[in-house]
Amino acid sequence: MFQPVTLFGLTMPLISFILIGFAIAFLIVTVLARASVTNKLQDLFESRLYDDFLAEVDDPIARFFIPDYNREYLRLNAYLAKGDADKASGTFDRLLTMRSTAKQRDDLLFRAFQFYMQQEKFKDAKSVLDEMKASGRNADRVKTSEQTWEIFGNKSFAYIDEMEAAFDDAPTKLQVSLALMLAAQYANKKDDVKALAWQDKAREILETPGEKD
């Protein structure tokens, strides 16, 4: 007569059922623990408790559940929110050397470009821009970034005609951006009168009551 295979007196189907139960229980505990870590980080960030947030990111539990790249990105958000440009710069430098998905890389490159431009680190911004262009993705974003670098990093005024032609029909938020870039280009061109006029136009738009589309 066929004898069922046993281990410690338990049949294999029963062992399989127990193992599956343990696996499901472990999965549930893992999901709940990860959610708890995520919710705590979100609460700390929204409460602007950035030092506590950074400490939590380095907690062993967070290190267990959150991949290295994601934790570094969380640090970046905290440093930017704190206005700590030095630590944010170092974090961008580290993130740019880390492996990531194409979507993560595109987001990181754009944020790094904006940060380096704001900090007038034009050489770093140009390096990031070159990678953005080489990727062949996000053509519109790359075009805007290239224009920004040429105007502020390379003192170009080659886009004056194009931007003035686009200004009147542009959405309000874009008008502010165009006005500021036109002001910078006229300054590059040593036309202080028009540079001041476009600065005033940007200020006028920002100070006009109403929803900015």
Image: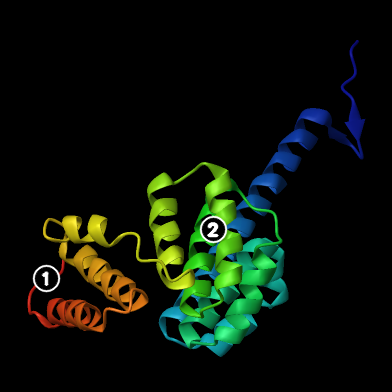
- 191 sits left or right of 110 in the view: left
Is there any visible trace of residue 65 in the rendered image? no
Question: Looking at the image, which residue is at 58% across and 54% down?
Answer: 130
Q: Quadrant of residue 196?
A: bottom left
- Tag 1: amino acid: Glu
Quick check: 68 above or below 14? Answer: below
| Circle 1 residue | 211
| Circle 2 residue | 129
Is there any visible trace of residue 126 in the rendered image? yes
Give the structural element (helix, strand or loop) at label 2: helix
Quick check: 38 above or below 135? Answer: below
Residue 181 spot, x, y in % from top left: 31, 70
Give the structural element (helix, strand or loop) at label 1: loop
- 209 sits left or right of 120 in the view: left
Q: Quadrant of residue 79?
A: bottom right
Of mark 2 and mark 1, the one earlier in the sequence is 2
Observer-nearest of 62 and 2: 62
Question: Looking at the image, which residue is at 53% across and 49% down?
Answer: 133
Residue 65 spot, x, y in % from top left: 66, 63
Mark 2: few/some/many CA within 10 Å (<14, 14-19, 20+): many
Observer-nearest of 134 and 2: 134
Snapshot colouring? rainbow
- 17 sits left or right of 177 in the view: right
Question: Looking at the image, which residue is at 70% across and 59% down?
Answer: 98
Pick out the residue farthest to the front: 190
